[in-house]
Image (cartoon, rainbow, N blue to C red):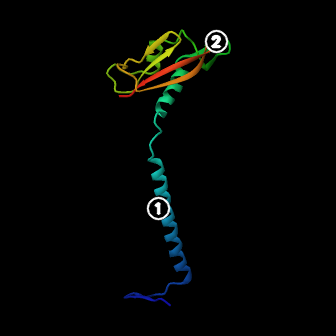
Amino acid sequence: MICITSKKGAFIPTLDAIELIIKTGVISLLFVLFIFVVASGSSKNVPKGLDDILDVQRVVTNCFARYDPISERNYPLEIDMTKFNEDSLGECYNVDKESRQRAYTLKLKDAEIKTRNFDGLPSSIFTKKVLVDGKIEILTFEVQNE
């Protein structure tokens, strides 16, 4: 039997107290291990090009989507060519000419539009199938990373 003594008296730990100390240690160790696993998983890098793909999706679904006034509905993968211009792109992706944010050039049919800050060669190119006037067309999305 273990007996811990001090000036105030003797402390004799019971089996329940020893079990509680062991359980507390194990739970604390598991908690620290859990925090370590979560922290190491959240520090992983975003896959290359994911931001660009998400920007393509945002621009296609929000900036140039065809609107049907009868049903009062937007059709996200249908492009309205009257909206496919630099003014609409500027409203949707508002950047200054000197901005260091990503810059884009979009090409669809014979039209080509650029963000205000596009000033050079693209670093990557993506394509997406979209509907224009009932026909499937290829939207080319050139990205210039700063």
Is the residue 13 above or below the residue 49 in the image?
below
Residue at position x 55%, y 77% in the image: 19
| Residue 144 position by quadrant | top left
Dot 1: element: helix
Earlier along the polypeptide chain: callout 1 or callout 2?
A: 1
Q: CA distance from mark 1 to mark 2?
A: 56 Å
Residue at position x 50%, y 84% in the image: 13
> 137 or 117, which is in the foreground?
137
Drawn side of residue 42 relative to residue 7, left or right: right
| Residue 62 position by quadrant | top right
Drawn side of residue 72 relative to residue 91, left or right: right
Residue at position x 47%, y 88% in the image: 2
| Residue underneath mark 1 | 32
Query: What kind of residue is marked 1?
Result: Val
Query: What kind of residue is marked 2?
Result: Pro
Q: In the rendering, which numbered label is found on residue 69?
A: 2
> 69 or 125, which is in the foreground?
125
Residue at position x 50%, y 62% in the image: 31
On the image, the x and y values in percent for residue 108 come to 52, 14
On the image, the x and y values in percent for residue 82 come to 54, 9
On the image, the x and y values in percent for residue 134 come to 65, 12
On the image, the x and y values in percent for residue 129 come to 58, 21
> 56 or 94, which is in the foreground?
56
Count all numbered tags in the image, as a single digit.
Answer: 2
Quadrant where the image shows the C terminus: top left
Dot 2: element: loop
Is the residue 25 above or below the residue 116 in the image?
below
